Amino acid sequence: MRIGKQDQSHTAIATSDADSITVRGLDLCDELIGKIGFTDYFWLLVLGEKPTDAQRQMMDACLVAIAEHGLVPSVQAARMTLAAGPDAWQGAMAAGLLGMGSVVAGSSEAAGRYLVEVVQRAEAEGVDIETAAVDSLKEHKAQRRKVAGLGHPQHSGGDPRADRLLEVADALGISGTYVGTLRILGRHASGIMDRPLPINVSGAIPAGILDAGWPVEAMKAVPLLARAAGLSAHLFEEAQRSIGFIMSHKADLAITYDGKPAKRSATAAE
């Protein structure tokens, strides 16, 4: 059963016939395989055109920055899934990707949308971005909301990955409205919110690639693609030397039961 009206029965991504496969208007075998790098291909697939050198390098930097970050919850979920089902790489990979919510990795999308919101607010109110950013931060404080793209529990003095990504954006000549907006937010946030709020990697990623021309609607694809590479490494290692059940056991030891005690009969007590 269809939900809503659906009358656009078309796709512009790929087609094939008995003799060829066409992807975004290019012959897969003659023009793409062996002739295009994967980051270029990712950009082409999503946007329908190849990136410039600067766009590719910015995207590459972002993918490298967050492909791997240790035994975060999504990785643990993937490794424990593979330990329980060694033949189910696809299930373990899915477990890891499904574990990428708004707190870990998915935060890049939230930060990207926040940057767009601040820029649009400035345009709508006819004020400069700094005024819009400060007003937004004050509203966040009044509403006790977290500021997307700022702050880090470990790197309170500054996220080195974010610093490096912004350096890359500057060097490539990409830094523009969104990088500028992020820096304005980073400059004012700590003073307004009364706590350290440095720019984090989840803020630097969307700032850099939004200025490079990547759409905010496709922002979530970037951390998903990056973490798929990191998960592949963890799943291969898990298959070679498993720690999934070790992590499960450690979790069991770390958590204590504070529910109601079971009722024991007098006979059992004896």
Image (spheres, rainbow, N blue to C red):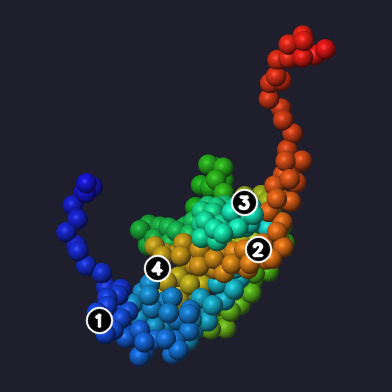
3D distance between C-alphas at marks 1 and 3:
42 Å
**Badge 3 element:** helix
Q: Is residue 170 above or below residue 129?
A: below
Which is more toward the observer, 146 or 109? Answer: 109
Residue at image position (53%, 42%) is: 143
Q: From the viewer's perspective, is 176 left or right of 126?
A: right
Exactly how many numbered labels are in the figure? 4
In the rendered image, which residue does mark 4 sit on? 215
3D distance between C-alphas at marks 2 and 1:
39 Å
Amino acid type assigned to the residue bearing label 2 in the image: Ala
Residue at image position (72%, 63%) is: 241
Amino acid type assigned to the residue bearing label 4 in the image: Pro
Which-is-in-front pick, marks 1 and 4? 1
Q: Residue 57: horizontal and vertical position, in percent? A: 53, 81
Residue at image position (73%, 38%) is: 255
Which is more toward the observer, 52 or 23? Answer: 23
Lower position in the chain sequence, tag 1 or tag 3: 1
Checking the image for residue 197, the label placed there is none
Amino acid type assigned to the residue bearing label 1 in the image: Ala
**Badge 1 element:** loop
Which is more toward the observer, 8 or 89? Answer: 89
Amino acid type assigned to the residue bearing label 3 in the image: Ala
Q: Classify 10 Å Cα crowding around label 2: few (below 14), some (14-19), many (20 and above).
A: some
Which is more toward the observer, 11 or 159? Answer: 11
Q: Classify 10 Å Cα crowding around label 3: few (below 14), some (14-19), many (20 and above).
A: few
3D distance between C-alphas at marks 2 and 3:
11 Å
Q: Quadrant of residue 196?
A: bottom right
Which-is-in-front pick, marks 4 and 3? 3
Checking the image for residue 239, the label placed there is 2
Q: From the viewer's perspective, is 139 left or right of 5?
A: right
Checking the image for residue 84, the label placed there is 3
Would residue 118 be visible to someone looking at this image? no
